[in-house]
Amino acid sequence: MYYIDPHIHMVSRVTDDYETLAKMGCVAVSEPAFWAGFDRGSVDGFRDYFRQLTEFETKRAGWYGIQHYTWLCINAKEAENVSLSREVIAMIPEFLDKPGVLGIGEIGLNKNTKNEATIFLEHLDLAAKTDELILIHTPHLEDKYQGTRMILDMLNGDRRLEHHRVLVDHVEEHTIRAVLDDGYWAGMTLYPTSKCTPERAVDMVEMYGPERLMVNSAGDWGPSKPTAVPDFILAMRLRGHPESLIRRVVYENPVKFFSQSRNFDFTPPETYEAVG
Amino acid sequence: MSIPLDAAEVLNREFLDIRARLLHLAASLDRLDRAEGVVSDDPRLAKIRAGLEILGGDEAERAERIQLLFSRPYDANWVKSLGVERRGER
Protein backbone atom coordinates (compact mmCIF):
# COMPACT_ATOMS: atom_id res chain seq x y z
CA MET A 1 0.00 0.00 0.00
CA TYR A 2 1.20 3.50 -0.81
CA TYR A 3 1.47 5.76 2.21
CA ILE A 4 2.73 9.17 3.31
CA ASP A 5 4.59 9.79 6.56
CA PRO A 6 3.36 13.28 7.50
CA HIS A 7 5.89 13.83 10.30
CA ILE A 8 9.41 12.45 10.08
CA HIS A 9 12.82 14.08 10.68
CA MET A 10 14.83 12.67 7.82
CA VAL A 11 17.86 14.94 8.36
CA SER A 12 18.51 12.67 11.36
CA ARG A 13 18.27 9.47 9.35
CA VAL A 14 20.68 7.75 7.01
CA THR A 15 20.10 7.47 3.27
CA ASP A 16 19.40 3.75 3.67
CA ASP A 17 16.24 4.70 5.57
CA TYR A 18 14.91 6.45 2.48
CA GLU A 19 15.50 3.25 0.53
CA THR A 20 13.70 1.19 3.19
CA LEU A 21 10.76 3.61 3.29
CA ALA A 22 10.46 3.49 -0.50
CA LYS A 23 10.46 -0.32 -0.46
CA MET A 24 7.66 -0.28 2.11
CA GLY A 25 5.40 1.92 -0.02
CA CYS A 26 6.25 5.40 1.22
CA VAL A 27 5.69 7.90 -1.61
CA ALA A 28 6.06 11.17 0.30
CA VAL A 29 7.27 12.52 3.63
CA SER A 30 6.77 15.84 5.36
CA GLU A 31 9.55 17.01 7.63
CA PRO A 32 8.93 19.63 10.30
CA ALA A 33 11.82 21.70 11.61
CA PHE A 34 12.82 20.56 15.09
CA TRP A 35 15.48 20.49 17.79
CA ALA A 36 18.90 19.25 16.65
CA GLY A 37 19.79 17.82 20.08
CA PHE A 38 21.57 21.04 21.01
CA ASP A 39 20.57 24.70 21.02
CA ARG A 40 21.73 26.51 17.90
CA GLY A 41 23.60 29.73 18.47
CA SER A 42 22.58 32.05 15.67
CA VAL A 43 19.98 32.83 13.06
CA ASP A 44 22.48 31.75 10.40
CA GLY A 45 22.51 28.29 11.96
CA PHE A 46 18.78 28.10 11.26
CA ARG A 47 19.18 29.55 7.78
CA ASP A 48 21.59 26.72 6.94
CA TYR A 49 19.19 24.18 8.46
CA PHE A 50 16.30 25.52 6.37
CA ARG A 51 18.52 25.27 3.26
CA GLN A 52 19.21 21.64 4.14
CA LEU A 53 15.48 20.98 4.54
CA THR A 54 14.42 22.74 1.35
CA GLU A 55 17.33 21.79 -0.91
CA PHE A 56 19.34 18.72 0.04
CA GLU A 57 16.67 16.59 1.73
CA THR A 58 14.41 17.04 -1.28
CA LYS A 59 17.20 15.77 -3.49
CA ARG A 60 18.14 12.86 -1.18
CA ALA A 61 14.50 11.71 -0.93
CA GLY A 62 14.18 11.97 -4.69
CA TRP A 63 16.94 9.43 -5.21
CA TYR A 64 14.40 6.84 -4.05
CA GLY A 65 11.32 8.34 -5.67
CA ILE A 66 10.06 9.85 -2.42
CA GLN A 67 8.56 13.34 -2.56
CA HIS A 68 9.83 15.51 0.28
CA TYR A 69 7.95 18.41 1.91
CA THR A 70 8.91 20.51 4.88
CA TRP A 71 7.80 22.96 7.59
CA LEU A 72 9.81 25.80 9.12
CA CYS A 73 10.06 27.27 12.61
CA ILE A 74 12.21 27.50 15.72
CA ASN A 75 11.15 24.69 18.03
CA ALA A 76 9.78 25.06 21.54
CA LYS A 77 12.97 23.93 23.28
CA GLU A 78 14.92 26.80 21.74
CA ALA A 79 12.09 29.26 22.35
CA GLU A 80 13.55 30.00 25.77
CA ASN A 81 15.99 32.20 23.84
CA VAL A 82 13.34 34.76 22.92
CA SER A 83 15.59 37.18 21.05
CA LEU A 84 17.02 34.42 18.81
CA SER A 85 13.52 33.06 18.28
CA ARG A 86 12.36 36.43 17.03
CA GLU A 87 15.31 36.66 14.65
CA VAL A 88 14.44 33.23 13.24
CA ILE A 89 10.74 34.08 12.89
CA ALA A 90 11.72 37.23 10.99
CA MET A 91 13.96 35.18 8.68
CA ILE A 92 11.46 32.37 7.90
CA PRO A 93 9.64 34.29 5.11
CA GLU A 94 12.83 34.03 3.00
CA PHE A 95 11.92 30.36 2.55
CA LEU A 96 8.12 30.30 2.47
CA ASP A 97 7.86 30.35 -1.32
CA LYS A 98 10.44 27.59 -1.83
CA PRO A 99 9.04 24.41 -3.44
CA GLY A 100 7.77 21.92 -0.90
CA VAL A 101 7.45 24.29 2.06
CA LEU A 102 4.01 23.47 3.47
CA GLY A 103 3.87 25.93 6.35
CA ILE A 104 4.96 26.78 9.89
CA GLY A 105 5.94 23.86 12.12
CA GLU A 106 6.48 22.04 14.28
CA ILE A 107 5.72 24.85 16.67
CA GLY A 108 4.30 24.16 20.10
CA LEU A 109 5.18 23.77 23.74
CA ASN A 110 7.69 21.62 25.59
CA LYS A 111 7.59 22.49 29.29
CA ASN A 112 4.63 24.88 29.00
CA THR A 113 6.58 28.00 29.97
CA LYS A 114 5.89 31.67 29.43
CA ASN A 115 8.62 32.01 26.78
CA GLU A 116 7.39 28.96 24.88
CA ALA A 117 3.84 30.33 24.84
CA THR A 118 5.09 33.76 23.76
CA ILE A 119 7.05 32.36 20.80
CA PHE A 120 4.20 30.01 19.90
CA LEU A 121 1.88 33.01 19.65
CA GLU A 122 4.40 34.86 17.50
CA HIS A 123 4.62 31.88 15.14
CA LEU A 124 0.81 31.86 14.92
CA ASP A 125 0.95 35.53 14.06
CA LEU A 126 3.41 34.82 11.24
CA ALA A 127 1.27 31.96 9.91
CA ALA A 128 -1.84 34.13 9.96
CA LYS A 129 -0.12 36.99 8.15
CA THR A 130 1.43 34.73 5.48
CA ASP A 131 -1.58 32.40 5.13
CA GLU A 132 0.44 29.28 5.97
CA LEU A 133 -0.68 25.89 7.24
CA ILE A 134 0.39 25.10 10.81
CA LEU A 135 1.84 21.89 12.26
CA ILE A 136 1.95 21.67 16.05
CA HIS A 137 4.06 19.66 18.49
CA THR A 138 2.42 18.84 21.81
CA PRO A 139 4.53 18.12 24.90
CA HIS A 140 5.46 14.70 26.21
CA LEU A 141 4.33 12.62 29.17
CA GLU A 142 3.00 14.53 32.20
CA ASP A 143 3.11 17.88 30.38
CA LYS A 144 1.05 16.79 27.38
CA TYR A 145 -2.43 17.35 28.80
CA GLN A 146 -1.81 20.84 30.16
CA GLY A 147 0.27 21.79 27.09
CA THR A 148 -2.32 20.59 24.61
CA ARG A 149 -5.06 22.50 26.43
CA MET A 150 -2.87 25.63 26.43
CA ILE A 151 -2.22 25.23 22.71
CA LEU A 152 -5.95 24.85 22.00
CA ASP A 153 -6.64 27.95 24.11
CA MET A 154 -4.18 29.95 21.99
CA LEU A 155 -5.45 28.58 18.67
CA ASN A 156 -9.09 29.11 19.59
CA GLY A 157 -8.28 32.62 20.77
CA ASP A 158 -7.06 33.73 17.33
CA ARG A 159 -10.02 34.17 15.01
CA ARG A 160 -7.75 34.58 11.97
CA LEU A 161 -6.89 30.88 12.02
CA GLU A 162 -8.99 28.36 10.12
CA HIS A 163 -9.11 25.20 12.19
CA HIS A 164 -9.04 22.83 9.21
CA ARG A 165 -5.64 24.31 8.26
CA VAL A 166 -3.99 23.28 11.55
CA LEU A 167 -2.56 19.86 12.44
CA VAL A 168 -2.06 19.11 16.14
CA ASP A 169 0.42 16.27 16.44
CA HIS A 170 1.31 13.63 19.03
CA VAL A 171 -2.27 13.27 20.28
CA GLU A 172 -3.00 10.43 22.68
CA GLU A 173 -6.06 9.05 24.44
CA HIS A 174 -6.46 12.05 26.76
CA THR A 175 -5.97 14.79 24.13
CA ILE A 176 -7.41 13.52 20.84
CA ARG A 177 -11.05 14.29 21.60
CA ALA A 178 -10.51 17.98 22.37
CA VAL A 179 -8.39 18.46 19.22
CA LEU A 180 -10.95 16.83 16.91
CA ASP A 181 -13.95 18.44 18.64
CA ASP A 182 -12.42 21.88 17.99
CA GLY A 183 -12.16 21.11 14.26
CA TYR A 184 -8.39 20.63 13.96
CA TRP A 185 -6.56 17.77 12.29
CA ALA A 186 -4.93 15.32 14.70
CA GLY A 187 -1.73 13.29 14.24
CA MET A 188 -0.91 10.15 16.19
CA THR A 189 2.82 9.55 16.60
CA LEU A 190 4.06 5.98 16.87
CA TYR A 191 7.03 6.10 19.19
CA PRO A 192 8.64 3.28 21.14
CA THR A 193 8.21 4.65 24.68
CA SER A 194 6.87 8.16 25.10
CA LYS A 195 3.97 8.41 22.68
CA CYS A 196 1.66 5.86 21.05
CA THR A 197 1.84 2.26 19.83
CA PRO A 198 0.35 1.03 16.53
CA GLU A 199 -2.29 -0.94 18.42
CA ARG A 200 -3.40 2.10 20.47
CA ALA A 201 -3.51 4.18 17.30
CA VAL A 202 -5.85 1.59 15.77
CA ASP A 203 -7.98 1.83 18.93
CA MET A 204 -8.27 5.60 18.44
CA VAL A 205 -9.27 5.18 14.78
CA GLU A 206 -11.99 2.80 15.96
CA MET A 207 -13.17 5.20 18.68
CA TYR A 208 -13.05 8.48 16.75
CA GLY A 209 -13.23 7.46 13.07
CA PRO A 210 -10.82 8.43 10.28
CA GLU A 211 -11.99 12.03 9.77
CA ARG A 212 -9.08 14.51 10.12
CA LEU A 213 -6.84 11.79 11.58
CA MET A 214 -3.30 10.89 10.49
CA VAL A 215 -0.53 8.66 11.74
CA ASN A 216 3.22 9.32 11.65
CA SER A 217 6.55 7.95 12.86
CA ALA A 218 8.25 11.20 13.91
CA GLY A 219 11.45 9.27 13.21
CA ASP A 220 14.37 11.37 14.43
CA TRP A 221 17.82 11.08 16.06
CA GLY A 222 16.45 9.44 19.22
CA PRO A 223 15.03 5.94 19.73
CA SER A 224 12.36 5.93 17.03
CA LYS A 225 11.24 3.78 14.13
CA PRO A 226 10.98 5.37 10.69
CA THR A 227 8.92 2.40 9.48
CA ALA A 228 6.26 2.83 12.17
CA VAL A 229 3.52 3.73 9.67
CA PRO A 230 3.76 0.30 7.97
CA ASP A 231 3.50 -1.18 11.50
CA PHE A 232 0.21 0.71 11.86
CA ILE A 233 -0.97 -0.57 8.46
CA LEU A 234 -0.28 -4.15 9.57
CA ALA A 235 -2.00 -3.61 12.93
CA MET A 236 -5.09 -2.28 11.10
CA ARG A 237 -5.14 -5.33 8.80
CA LEU A 238 -4.75 -7.77 11.69
CA ARG A 239 -7.68 -6.04 13.41
CA GLY A 240 -9.77 -6.75 10.29
CA HIS A 241 -10.13 -3.23 8.91
CA PRO A 242 -10.66 -2.75 5.15
CA GLU A 243 -7.90 -1.48 2.88
CA SER A 244 -10.03 1.56 1.99
CA LEU A 245 -10.06 2.71 5.61
CA ILE A 246 -6.33 2.16 6.03
CA ARG A 247 -5.57 4.03 2.81
CA ARG A 248 -7.71 6.94 3.96
CA VAL A 249 -5.70 7.37 7.16
CA VAL A 250 -2.19 6.83 5.78
CA TYR A 251 -2.54 8.35 2.31
CA GLU A 252 -5.73 10.23 1.48
CA ASN A 253 -5.86 12.25 4.69
CA PRO A 254 -2.31 13.63 4.39
CA VAL A 255 -2.96 14.49 0.73
CA LYS A 256 -6.18 16.28 1.69
CA PHE A 257 -4.56 18.30 4.46
CA PHE A 258 -1.39 19.17 2.55
CA SER A 259 -3.38 20.13 -0.57
CA GLN A 260 -4.40 23.27 1.27
CA SER A 261 -0.82 24.52 0.81
CA ARG A 262 0.13 26.33 -2.40
CA ASN A 263 3.49 24.51 -2.31
CA PHE A 264 2.10 20.96 -2.24
CA ASP A 265 2.98 20.00 -5.80
CA PHE A 266 2.28 16.31 -5.35
CA THR A 267 2.51 13.67 -8.07
CA PRO A 268 0.29 10.70 -7.13
CA PRO A 269 2.03 7.35 -7.57
CA GLU A 270 -0.68 6.19 -9.97
CA THR A 271 0.39 9.02 -12.27
CA TYR A 272 4.03 8.09 -12.42
CA GLU A 273 3.15 4.44 -12.84
CA ALA A 274 1.27 5.42 -16.01
CA VAL A 275 4.19 7.51 -17.23
CA GLY A 276 6.65 4.73 -16.47
CA MET B 1 -16.87 2.98 14.23
CA SER B 2 -16.73 -0.48 15.78
CA ILE B 3 -14.03 -3.14 16.06
CA PRO B 4 -14.36 -5.75 13.28
CA LEU B 5 -13.45 -8.50 15.75
CA ASP B 6 -15.88 -9.74 18.40
CA ALA B 7 -14.94 -9.87 22.08
CA ALA B 8 -14.04 -13.56 22.02
CA GLU B 9 -11.66 -13.01 19.12
CA VAL B 10 -10.04 -10.04 20.85
CA LEU B 11 -9.55 -12.09 24.02
CA ASN B 12 -8.11 -15.01 22.06
CA ARG B 13 -5.64 -12.76 20.30
CA GLU B 14 -4.63 -10.69 23.30
CA PHE B 15 -4.75 -13.10 26.23
CA LEU B 16 -1.10 -14.14 26.12
CA ASP B 17 0.01 -10.54 25.57
CA ILE B 18 -2.03 -9.31 28.55
CA ARG B 19 -0.70 -12.18 30.67
CA ALA B 20 2.88 -11.30 29.71
CA ARG B 21 2.36 -7.62 30.54
CA LEU B 22 0.83 -8.47 33.91
CA LEU B 23 3.87 -10.62 34.67
CA HIS B 24 6.14 -7.77 33.61
CA LEU B 25 4.35 -5.44 36.01
CA ALA B 26 4.38 -8.01 38.82
CA ALA B 27 8.10 -8.66 38.40
CA SER B 28 8.84 -4.91 38.39
CA LEU B 29 6.94 -4.45 41.66
CA ASP B 30 8.68 -7.51 43.17
CA ARG B 31 12.03 -6.00 42.12
CA LEU B 32 11.12 -2.82 43.94
CA ASP B 33 10.34 -4.86 47.07
CA ARG B 34 13.64 -6.76 46.89
CA ALA B 35 15.78 -3.69 46.36
CA GLU B 36 17.43 -1.97 49.31
CA GLY B 37 16.03 1.33 50.49
CA VAL B 38 12.54 2.69 50.99
CA VAL B 39 10.42 4.41 48.33
CA SER B 40 7.03 3.98 49.96
CA ASP B 41 6.65 7.76 50.25
CA ASP B 42 7.53 8.38 46.60
CA PRO B 43 4.44 9.90 44.93
CA ARG B 44 5.17 7.91 41.78
CA LEU B 45 4.39 4.74 43.70
CA ALA B 46 0.99 6.11 44.67
CA LYS B 47 0.33 6.86 41.00
CA ILE B 48 1.26 3.30 40.08
CA ARG B 49 -1.14 1.94 42.72
CA ALA B 50 -3.91 4.23 41.48
CA GLY B 51 -3.19 3.05 37.93
CA LEU B 52 -3.52 -0.58 38.98
CA GLU B 53 -6.90 0.23 40.51
CA ILE B 54 -8.04 1.71 37.21
CA LEU B 55 -6.94 -1.45 35.41
CA GLY B 56 -8.80 -3.65 37.90
CA GLY B 57 -12.07 -1.74 37.62
CA ASP B 58 -14.98 -2.24 35.24
CA GLU B 59 -15.24 1.35 34.05
CA ALA B 60 -14.43 1.99 30.37
CA GLU B 61 -11.83 4.37 28.87
CA ARG B 62 -9.07 2.98 31.06
CA ALA B 63 -6.33 4.23 28.74
CA GLU B 64 -7.62 7.81 28.86
CA ARG B 65 -7.97 7.68 32.65
CA ILE B 66 -4.44 6.28 33.06
CA GLN B 67 -3.14 9.10 30.84
CA LEU B 68 -4.90 11.70 32.98
CA LEU B 69 -3.63 10.07 36.17
CA PHE B 70 -0.06 10.63 34.98
CA SER B 71 -0.72 14.19 33.72
CA ARG B 72 -0.28 17.53 35.38
CA PRO B 73 -3.70 19.11 35.88
CA TYR B 74 -4.86 21.82 33.49
CA ASP B 75 -4.71 25.34 34.88
CA ALA B 76 -7.41 27.30 33.07
CA ASN B 77 -5.86 30.55 34.28
CA TRP B 78 -2.47 29.83 32.76
CA VAL B 79 -2.37 33.06 30.71
CA LYS B 80 -2.61 35.12 33.87
CA SER B 81 -0.46 32.89 36.06
CA LEU B 82 2.36 32.78 33.49
CA GLY B 83 1.96 36.44 32.58
CA VAL B 84 1.72 35.76 28.84
CA GLU B 85 0.83 38.68 26.62
CA ARG B 86 -1.72 37.56 23.99
CA ARG B 87 -1.06 38.69 20.46
CA GLY B 88 -3.08 38.24 17.32
CA GLU B 89 -6.70 39.06 16.65
CA ARG B 90 -9.24 37.65 19.06
Image (cartoon, coloured by chain):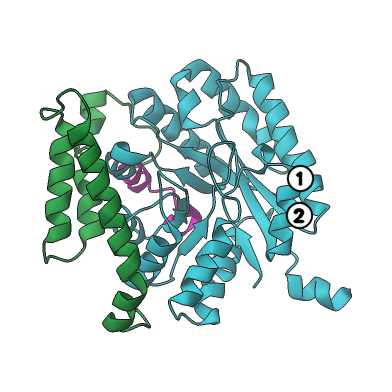
Span of residues in magenta = A151-166
Q: Which mark is residue A19?
A: 2
The cyan chain is A
Give me the C-alpha separation between circle 1 and circle 2.
7 Å
Observer able to see residue B82: yes
The one of A31 and A20 positioned closer to us in this rendering: A20
Observer able to see residue A265: no
Q: Amino acid at mark 2?
A: Glu
Q: Is B61 left, or right, of A206 in this rendering?
A: left
Does the segment drawn in magenta span residue A246? Answer: no
Q: Residues within 10 Å of mark 2 (few under 14, many from 20)?
A: some
> What's the residue at 23%, 32% (across, down)?
B78
Q: Is A152 left, or right, of B39 in this rendering?
A: right
Residue highlighted by disc 1:
A15
> Does the residue at mark 1 contact the one at mark 2 (Cβ under 8 Å)?
yes
The quadrant of the rendering that contains the N terminus of chain B is bottom left
Subunit of mark 2? A
Looking at the picture, how far across and down is residue B59, in whole percent?
12, 65
Q: Secondary structure at mark 1?
A: helix
The quadrant of the rendering that contains the C terminus of chain B is top left
Q: Secondary structure at mark 2?
A: helix
> What's the residue at 51%, 47% (across, down)?
A134
> What's the residue at 69%, 30% (across, down)?
A49
Looking at the picture, how far across and down is residue A98, in whole percent?
74, 43
* Rendered position, B59 above or below A69: below
Colour of chain B in the image: green
Determine which quarter of the picture holds residue A40: top right
